[in-house]
């Protein structure tokens, strides 16, 4: 993606990919999280319940994802920058 990492310290390197992704999202005009497309904190419970009813959405996850994990993911996805 052309993000310079060679001069980053070992401690700063884990943040290189997230920064590059946010930069790309901003460049292409992706909405800034779930709030930008009309969802809010009050919607998290319904979104979690709806997701759990569709196991195909979770089948490809690299680890088990339940209600607590989805709650955290959705709350964290409200706004990215």
Image (cartoon, rainbow, N blue to C red):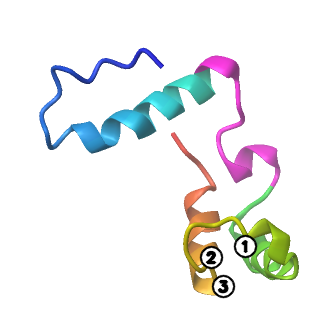
Mark 3 vs mark 1, CA separation in Å: 10 Å
Q: Is residue 36 magenta?
A: yes
Any mark on residue 67, and which?
3
Q: Residue at x 64, y 74 (%)?
A: 70
Above or below: residue 78 compared with residue 10: below
Relative to 21, residue 51 above or below: below
Residue topped by disc 2: 71
Mark 1: secondary structure: helix
Mark 2 and mark 1 in contact? Answer it, CB < 8 Å: yes
Q: Tell me residue 8's x, y (percent).
A: 17, 27
Asked whether 72 or 11 is in front, the reply is 11
Between circles 2 and 1, the one closer to the viewer is 2
Q: Is residue 9 left or right of residue 48?
A: left
Q: Quadrant of residue 64?
A: bottom right
**Part of the protein shown in magenta:** 27-38
Q: Give the CA distance from mark 2 to mark 3.
A: 6 Å
- Label 2 residue SS: helix
Which residue, given by chain and number where applicable, does mark 1 sit on?
44
Measured from the top left, where is residue 56 in percent x and y? 83, 70
Quick one: label 1, few (<14), some, or many (20+) residues within 10 Å? some
The structure residue drawn at horizontal position 65% and vertical position 39%, both measured from the top left corner, is: 32
């Amino acid at each position: 993606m052309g993000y310079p990492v060679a001069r980053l310290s070992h401690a700063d390197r884990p943040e290189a990919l997230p920064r590059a992704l946010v930069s790309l999202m901003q460049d292409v005009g992706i909405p800034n999280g779930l709030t930008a497309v009309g969802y809010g904190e009050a919607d998290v419970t319904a979104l979690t319940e709806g997701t759990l009813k569709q196991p195909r959405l979770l089948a490809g996850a690299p680890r088990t994802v339940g209600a607590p994990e989805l709650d955290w993911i959705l709350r964290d996805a409200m706004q990215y920058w």
